[in-house]
Image: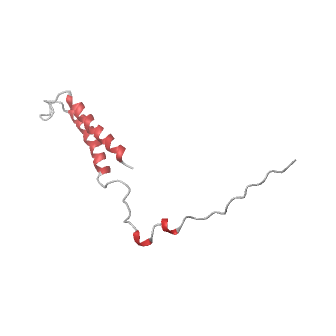
Amino acid sequence: MPESHRRKKSAYTPPPESTTRKSDDKKPPVKIGNSRWLAPVMVAMFVIGLAWIVVWYVSPDNPLMVDLAGWNVAVGFVFIGIGFFLSTKWE
């Protein structure tokens, strides 16, 4: 039975030097991460929302909150929702 011919693999040759970046073409590094204000604002939104709801339940006849009546819970949850939205941007 005849033997099949083996394929010879060509030797690996690296790409030419012209495709690599020269050392004098360096760009400044890109800043990766969060802004410094994100975490404090996120926590502040959570605290403000919780405080708004707690203050309305503790003293519903507060002059600033009496006009909103039941909408005070919605206002508190809006602040909490903003906090959750900001938490999705935090790394």
Quick check: can you spot residue 57?
A: no
* Residue at x-position 17% and y-position 28%: 69
Residue at the farthest front position: 2
Figure label count: 0
* Residue at x-position 36% and y-position 59%: 31
In this picture, residue 13 sits left or right of residue 41: right
* Residue at x-position 19% and y-position 32%: 59
* Residue at x-position 78% and y-position 53%: 5
66 w.r.t. 19: above or below:
above
51 w.r.t. 34: above or below:
above
In this picture, residue 86 sits left or right of residue 63: right
Q: Report x, y in % for residue 55.
A: 22, 36
Residue in front for this viewpoint, 89 or 63? 89
Q: Report x, y in % for residue 19.
A: 49, 65
Where, by quadrant of the figure, is residue 26 drawn? bottom left
Q: Report x, y in % for residue 23.
A: 44, 71
Where, by quadrant of the figure, is residue 80 drawn? top left
Quick check: can you spot residue 22?
A: yes
